[in-house]
Amino acid sequence: MNTHKKEDDALISIIIPTHNRAFIIEKCINTIFNQTYKNFELIIVDDHSEDNTIEILNHILDPRLRVFSLKEKKGAQAARNEGIRNASWDWICFNDSDDFWIDNKLEIHIKYLKKLEYNKDVVFYTDCYKFEESSNKKSIWNLPEIKYYFSYKSLLTRPGPVFPGLFFNKNLIIDSGLLDESVPSYQEWDTSLLLAKNGAKFFHIKEPLFIYNLHSGPTISKDMTRDFNGYQYIINKYKDDIIKYCGIRIWKRHIKDQYRQLVKEVFPQFNANNDPILINNIHIVLVEVELYFLNNKMITILKKFKRKIKKYLAFHKR
């Protein structure tokens, strides 16, 4: 399929994975259908919901909506891949089923797409509003800057964009081999790394174009063990490239961040019997801490928690 080169003829496939989001999915969809730019299809992939999500979707009659259902729960990345495989158009946008778009989001994407002459090697990403449901507060979240000509190196240093802000040519992800379906969390970071490693350049649209919704329902970001495992999965996966392109200092910073997460969030709720992946990741972090921080001023604190975690692991292995 040829890439359209007229602004009013750029066709977009919007992909939303969902699971048990009956309480919010319709509000999310309405922010898509209220877009000022209308040339799109909306693909929703239901990841085997157990609530009435599908019933709600089946009552929406807009012809731009296409719904697919997975026969078993496979995770959000698998649902996104299903959406990509079924996308009709050249340009891809993601959203999450609990986040909301600003009405002119697509219009602004198209404006920048035109400005960069429909460059199929560019991934656009945007800032957003962060809404905290518990306090009813909304603030602007400025996403980290990714260097256009050194996007892969930039993304190796820290997590990057979030899914609702991404916009890119479909061939970028097809040529990259689709998304890694094994990533426990930080899935948007892994997706951005995948695209950048295969030559994509990231362009920052410094406008808040969606609402990142922090609600009371279940989300990946609230599971600290999954958060820890996901981060470790990615830095393990890209370790050689992190050291090659960014240096050992950045690798050590990743390890230090993981250690802090382990001590503050994971260890207090740790159950060694239930998560062998977590046990393995803890060992990896402890080995790296011992390797790199023995002469660091943090040594007393590091040794203290290292003994605590080893003792805890030993107890649960009996």
Image: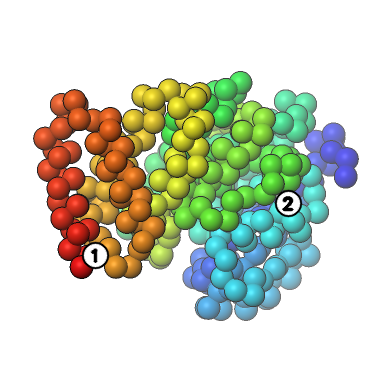
Specify the color scheme.
Answer: rainbow
Q: Quadrant of the C terminus?
A: bottom left
Which of 38/87 is in front?
87
Q: From the viewer's side, name the closer residue of 50 and 128.
A: 50
Residue corresponding to mark 1: 317
Residue 245: x, y in percent? Answer: 50, 23
Q: Quadrant of residue 291?
A: top left
The quarter holding residue 272 reads: bottom left
Disc 1 residue crowd, few under 14, some 14–19, many 20+, Cα 10 Å? few
Q: What amino acid is at disc 1? A: Lys
Q: Residue at x 66, y 71 (%)?
A: 69
Label tally: 2
| Residue 70 can be seen, yes or no | yes
| Residue 82 at x, y percent in the picture | 69, 60
Q: Badge 2: few (under 14), some or many (20 or more) residues near its Cα, within 10 Å?
A: many
Position above or below: 166 against 293: below
Q: Which residue is mark 2?
A: 13
Residue 108 visible in image? no
Left/right of residue 214 with respect to residue 264 in the rendered view: right
Instruction: Work out which residue is located at the far front of the displayed protein and give it.
Output: 318
For image coordinates 11% across by 35% down, the residue present is 300
Work out how far the residue at label 2 is from the one at label 1, CA to CA, in angstroms.
49 Å
Which of 123/205 is in front? Answer: 123
- For marks 2 and 1, give the one nearer the viewer: 1
Mark 1: secondary structure: loop
Q: Secondary structure at mark 2?
A: strand
